[in-house]
Image (cartoon, helix red, strand yellow):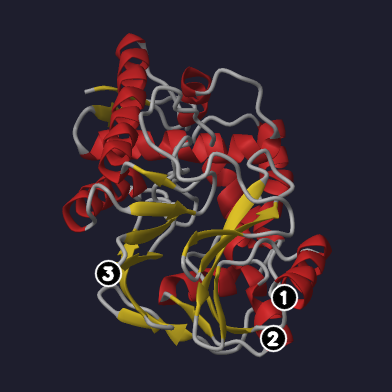
Amino acid sequence: MLKKNEESRLSFPSEEPPERGSFIELAPGILWTRIPLPFRLDHVNIYLIDDGDGWAVLDTGIGDQPTRDLWEALAGRTLAGRRLTRLIVTHYHPDHIGLAGWLCERYDLPLFTTQTSYLGCLTISLSPGSLDAKPYRDFYARHGMAPETVDLVSSQGHSYLKMVAPLPPTFSRVVDGDTLLIGGREFQALTGDGHAPEQLMLYCPSENIFLAADQVIARITPNISVWAVNPDGDPLGLYLRSLKRLKGEIPADALVLPGHQLPFHGLHERCDELAEHHAGRCVLIAEACAMKPHSVADLVPVLFTRALDPHQLSFAFSEVHAHVNFMLKRGELRHAASKDGNIRVEAA
């Protein structure tokens, strides 16, 4: 869910993104382009890293024909004949892994990613309608969502998850702490949770460049969601833990290359801003629940005051749920008595 940060004092090496089908060289041998997305967040950043006789690719865009066409143009014309050497995928969300199967087959690329990313996407690919099933509909209903909204979210809200080409049958696993040699650079692999489980990030110490995926973005907060398959999970707690780790392991002046929006300097400040943002959301929930018990659905308009389409509503509901679970685990909320079977929380 998009949340603007207008007061940030981050600095940006490029004030404008690359034009469609073109690249900006952010450092020698590191290229940045963008792939359009058919959502409110209308793009994903793609990075190419000099890999000797070709380019290693970081992330893909969704699995649709316009994205395939754009990749054909990028690989055939813009890269001037240099081959693609390998594909590195940061996490299993369709805007990052959606075209992985097609790219790997089309350009004979090995796929490098985390095991959770591969298996998470594989599950969706093999059973794209599973999130429409009754147990997941009941999950939304038990937390106060109206039946007609459940129908919208279950049918339309998850449609983006199906924008994935079939994955390659094999992959090369990347584990936290690994070192990837790409061309003449060494990249340290880090993983973080909250936005996506075992999301892969890469740090090049020799050049102080941090490929942050969706864990840290300059002017929006990455979506942190509870999903029906793990209803009692604490992704917000995991996310805040990851932000602390990044501040401890990545220098404050690193060049941050995120999965969306502009590359920037100011990693530690941005980590603090993100933590403060979520603390403020918890305050709003606490104030509402001090007045009366609320379901997760009741709390959505407390945090999101504008109108939401089904896609946005599914994210908003799941993000509110992440804050509720975080506050339950910290003892700031507790479950309230219920006569109608719906789950509500109140101030502890």
Question: Which one is in front, 181 or 142?
Answer: 181
Q: What is the x, y in percent for residue 201?
A: 38, 64
Residue drawn at x 34%, y 31% is 278
| One can see residue 336 in this view | no
- Badge 2: how crowded within 10 Å, few (<14), some, or many (20+)? some
Q: Closer to the N terminus: mark 3 or mark 1?
A: 1
Question: Which one is in front, 229 or 94?
Answer: 94
Kind of residue at badge 2: Tyr
Given contact means CB atoms under 8 Å apart, are the residues at marks 1 and 2 in contact? yes
Residue drawn at x 43%, y 71% is 116
Name the residue carrying label 1. Answer: 75
Q: Is residue 277 left or right of residue 150?
A: left
Name the residue carrying label 3. Answer: 206
- Asked if residue 225 is positioned above or below residue 60 in the image, the reply reads above
| One can see residue 206 in this view | yes
What is the residue that sits farthest to the top in this orientation?
291
Q: Nearer the viewer, mark 3 or mark 2?
A: 3
Q: Secondary structure at mark 2?
A: helix
Q: Secondary structure at mark 3?
A: loop
Q: Which quarter of the figure is the N terminus placed in?
A: top right
Distance between the alpha carbons at the discs numbered 1 and 2: 9 Å
Q: Closer to the N terminus: mark 1 or mark 2?
A: 1
Q: What is the x, y in percent for residue 10?
A: 37, 35
Given contact means CB atoms under 8 Å apart, are the residues at marks 3 and 2 in contact? no
